[in-house]
Amino acid sequence: MHVDSELDIPLYLQIYEQCRKEIIEGVYPAGEKLPPIRKLAEELRVARNTVESAYRQLAQEGFVASKSGSGYVVEKLNLDDMVFAANINDSFNRYADHEKAVLSSFPEIPEKKSYEYDFSYGNLSDNAFPVETWRKLTTDVLYSTEIADASRYNDNMGDFLLRLNIANHLRKTRGVHCFPQQVVIQAGTQASLQNLLTLFDPAKDRIAMEDPGNDGVRLVFTHNRFEVVPCPVYQGSQAFFDALTHSGARLAFVTPSNQFPTGTVMPVQGRQHLLDWARTNNAYIIEDDYCREFRYNVRPVPALQSLDTYHRVIYLGTFSRALSPAMRMNYLILPPELLKQWTEVFAGYYSAVPWLSQVVLRRFMERGHWDKLLRRTQTHNKRKRELLLTALREHMGGKITIMESGAGLHLLLGVRDERSQDTLIVEAEKEGVCICETDKYWIEKPHPLENYVLIGFSAIDEDRIAPGIERLAQAWFG
Amino acid sequence: MHVDSELDIPLYLQIYEQCRKEIIEGVYPAGEKLPPIRKLAEELRVARNTVESAYRQLAQEGFVASKSGSGYVVEKLNLDDMVFAANINDSFNRYADHEKAVLSSFPEIPEKKSYEYDFSYGNLSDNAFPVETWRKLTTDVLYSTEIADASRYNDNMGDFLLRLNIANHLRKTRGVHCFPQQVVIQAGTQASLQNLLTLFDPAKDRIAMEDPGNDGVRLVFTHNRFEVVPCPVYQGSQAFFDALTHSGARLAFVTPSNQFPTGTVMPVQGRQHLLDWARTNNAYIIEDDYCREFRYNVRPVPALQSLDTYHRVIYLGTFSRALSPAMRMNYLILPPELLKQWTEVFAGYYSAVPWLSQVVLRRFMERGHWDKLLRRTQTHNKRKRELLLTALREHMGGKITIMESGAGLHLLLGVRDERSQDTLIVEAEKEGVCICETDKYWIEKPHPLENYVLIGFSAIDEDRIAPGIERLAQAWFG
């Protein structure tokens, strides 16, 4: 055994590691005494405390036991299995072959596929984020007296003033009526729904969903073992309500202001029927108002929640469509009865949303930046939609059917020669154009929109829309 | 009907709102035609398009239908239930009395109780957060080419380079062996466990927990309908392993490096037994290494995962103990088999952790700030602990029993006159001292530590410790 005071490792640690190694290798078998402290200290020319620290560590970890009068004695251990990884090659070799195969299948850096023309849905354009404002407000918050909250667990319902701002904003723009206390800040649609489901019972409560509908949401329901009942939105209002009435559902997930993905708006009679259904069946309606900011031809349709005198609507809103999908902030607005249950259930929970994001967003809203951003995004998206529709008419004319209703951030496109959507997507990809499937939105298959694809316009830059559609037309029609 | 071009409201909207009001009030009953567009336009001195836009909106919402040759005809609606909230007083009056009571019970601004001497557990001291560094790195990120990711949904496993940094850091400091791919960035212990539970089945899989143990974690298990089997840690190793062996559990949640809340360290034989148990029973061990950075007398005990050749350990780590509990960032390290399942289950999910937090943290780690912060926090906490122990000995001497083991951010304190912890807490509060209960950590009751309280030292400032303990001694012993 030796120590080297030139090394960057504390002396007692060097001693500890060598002893441990020798115990594992059997140089000091079970029952054997370690060298007396005084003797080893003299030998290694270190202080007795140094050796004692090393021995104490070994004792703490159970390698040796301190026996008065006997010194430190090695314990009996099953050492065959005790392997300590020294470096990454060692690490890798410790894995069995099937495990190595699993790991090898994961790429080192995730592939970020990039397309010349990106008509995907969900992302925003590269320069959408209000960088300078966010930077400035972040600095303001970090240098304010609120900074003490960075060191704490804060209100698990979210920053109160942020909730107030959201409540006020929604009352003005969507007719949603709620108190700030009813607003719960969450970390994304799926996370918020997962939490909401904690208030329900998969053994008893079914969930009715629009078909076609949001596949990401459906995943959360099914993973949490809830039975999902499809209610067709593509066969007329009656078919939808028949399915709903017979569903026995406790929850209905709907997108009444802009059906996702077909785009239709639920007329006011339908909304009233939905509310009546909920009241009659002691059910709740989850209204996903995801695209409320973006209606281009006409004024936004008030939220379903604005008609809800029975307090059966759970309102879902997000910041992902206008501010940033990467911020991971959305909110639920709970009717009073559910609010009570929620606070009881989540009383011992911590929020999943960072304090800093919330407080910066609150200031962003308070100072009018949110309203400004919405107006700018609305104008921008309106222009993009017009460019898209014009380009589609110009390059594809009578060969396609367009399904959209002057709102949202996408449209559905059917090609009239009955090629499958998979074919259409692959052909587009070959020419550097990214478009999306619609298959995944359907529960009941086969479905009537087999050869429809989804064209999004939130991500693509304005000046790439026309050339992109021209390229798509070439890809499809030569 | 009239319009006012001085108002900040678009003219067509003013017309829309008045028409809607009159329809609801029955001025235009079902079957009645709205005034012809040309006529109303002349009357109001506006463009025909303006009136047409208003009528189109009403049609979109189902109030009227456009009939060729007949103009716009009012539809039959159930109008009794259709109330549109105009202001907050209206909103409040729409609630039934029992609902108003619910809302009134929620305070406008949540109470932030503040104590003169805060010995609570969980929060950090007010100035713990690295403000200037975080500000600078945030600015760097916002003005880098990475900013395009602010507009996207990113890798749901988390920022790859952050995962790499975490894997490297843990290998060096905890002996944890893993590849970056196995690291999953999550939004807090409870959120990560909730997600993990999706891979298991509450109908079949029991969860063994240390008793006493982490109550916040237990909440997640029980809320997700998993049966929790208590395994006593206060009656010796044998009792723990007997309970575990008979539990039939599929998961065991343990804190081997620093048992929470008792502080004991699981010796290496125990760790080996635990690993053997997992292998034999096709079970998994969730190792919550929450306090790994803070050991004061001796070198940190390597993580259980470092001994785990069977790949049964799921490692939980957090940034809440040293950086900030308000950032809401932690991680899971999954063994290969579970990693595979996880990626399949969560393939359609979005991350709950903001991109910006992750990238700033990654740079924070890459530039050595994390190591520096840990060292500084370690030194600081060590000093606080010493001050605390000294003050306790000085002011309470033989009247108390201290339970701690040179690690972590708290200790347990038993008062020898058998006052209940509730009494001790109330008496402390009266004198402005905040301390915590231990009752909530126990599953099986009554328990042997009835008159023990928890004293934390992460939140309290260094110079308040001694006066705080002096005050506490006065409160308890006069």
Image (tube, coloured by chain):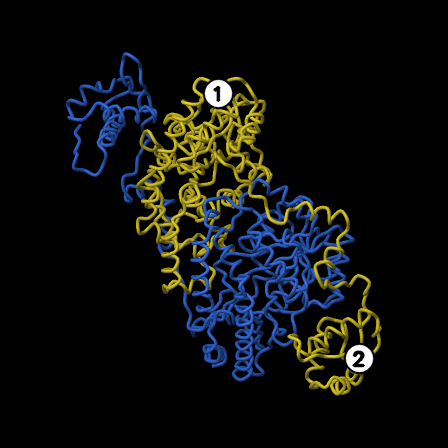
Chain colours: A blue, B yellow
Provide the secondary structure element on which disc 2 rests.
Answer: loop
Circle count: 2
Q: State which quarter of the image contains the N terminus of chain A.
A: top left
The residue carrying mark 2 is B34
**How would you rate the neighbour count of disc 1 (Cα within 10 Å): few for under 14, some for 14-19, many for 20 or more?**
few
Q: In the picture, residue B67 is in which quadrant?
A: bottom right
Identified by mark 2, the residue type is Leu
Q: Nearer the viewer, residue A204 or B146?
A: B146
Identified by mark 1, the residue type is Gln
Left or right of A398 on screen, residue A119: left
As displayed, is residue B431 above or below residue A420?
A: above
Q: Nearer the viewer, residue A372 or B264?
A: A372
Left or right of A187 on screen, residue B71: right
Q: Nearer the viewer, residue A274 or B145?
A: B145
For the question of whether residue A477 can be seen, the reply is: yes
Q: Position of residue B470 (x, y in %)?
A: 45, 27
Q: Which chain is indicated by disc 1?
A: B
Provide the secondary structure element on which disc 1 rests.
Answer: loop
Q: Residue at horizontal 60%, vertical 77%?
A: A401
Q: Residue at horizontal 65%, vertical 57%?
A: A315
| Outermost residue, top side | A69
The residue carrying mark 1 is B235
As displayed, is residue B217 above or below residue A141?
A: above
As displayed, is residue B394 above or below residue B432?
A: above
Q: Which chain is indicated by disc 2?
A: B
Please tell me which of labels 1 and 2 falls first in the chain: 2
Residue B330: which disc?
Answer: none
